[in-house]
Amino acid sequence: MLILAASALEKAASLPGSFWLKVGLGVAAFLLAVVLLRKLMETNKVILIAVGFVLCSLVFINWVYERNEPAFLTPIVNVLAEFLPTKGAYEVRQQTDPTPGKNPKPTPKPKR
């Protein structure tokens, strides 16, 4: 059994320092999340829900604007992208020349 422990320690010592830094940061982030969640559970629930709703809304609106949403949300974002601004539509609009007379205005369709 002592031989196995020595070989495991040798393998662990041969890992690069960046690996141990990432492991340490991951453990610290997990512990920080647990402490923050315990503190948040002591606050007023209405305020907690309101702040959570605002944060989730900001993330979702950013996904619609940048179009970098997770794949399973693409059908929902496609529907909302028709009503909310997107980065691609803004860039297309910025490429047109704003000088009067340069871009003809589209003619309205006659009403029947």
Image: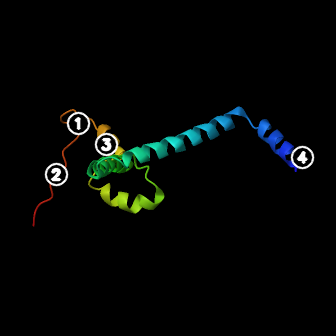
Q: Are marks 1 and 2 in contact (CB under 8 Å)?
A: no
Q: Farthest residue toward the bottom?
A: 112
Where does the image place residue 22, in percent across and percent down from the top left? 62, 38
Residue type (three-letter) at the residue carrying disc 4: Ile
**For residue 107, which numbered disc appears in the image?**
2
Q: Secondary structure at mark 4?
A: helix
Secondary element at tag 3: helix
Q: Label 1 belongs to which residue?
A: 102
Callout 2 secondary element: loop
Instruction: Determine which residue is flagged by label 3.
Output: 90
Q: Residue furthest right?
A: 3
Gap between marks 3 and 4 measured at Cα: 65 Å
Mark 3 vs 2, N-terminal side = 3
Answer with mark 1 or mark 3, whichever residue precedes in sequence: 3
Residue under circle 4?
3
Count every numbered label the image shows and give the total.
Answer: 4
Badge 1 or badge 2: first in the primary sequence: 1
Task: Kindly identify the amino acid type of the residue bearing the numbered disc 3.
Answer: Tyr
User: Residue at 63% of width from left, 40% of height from top?
Assistant: 23
Does label 3 or label 4 sit earlier along the sequence? Answer: 4
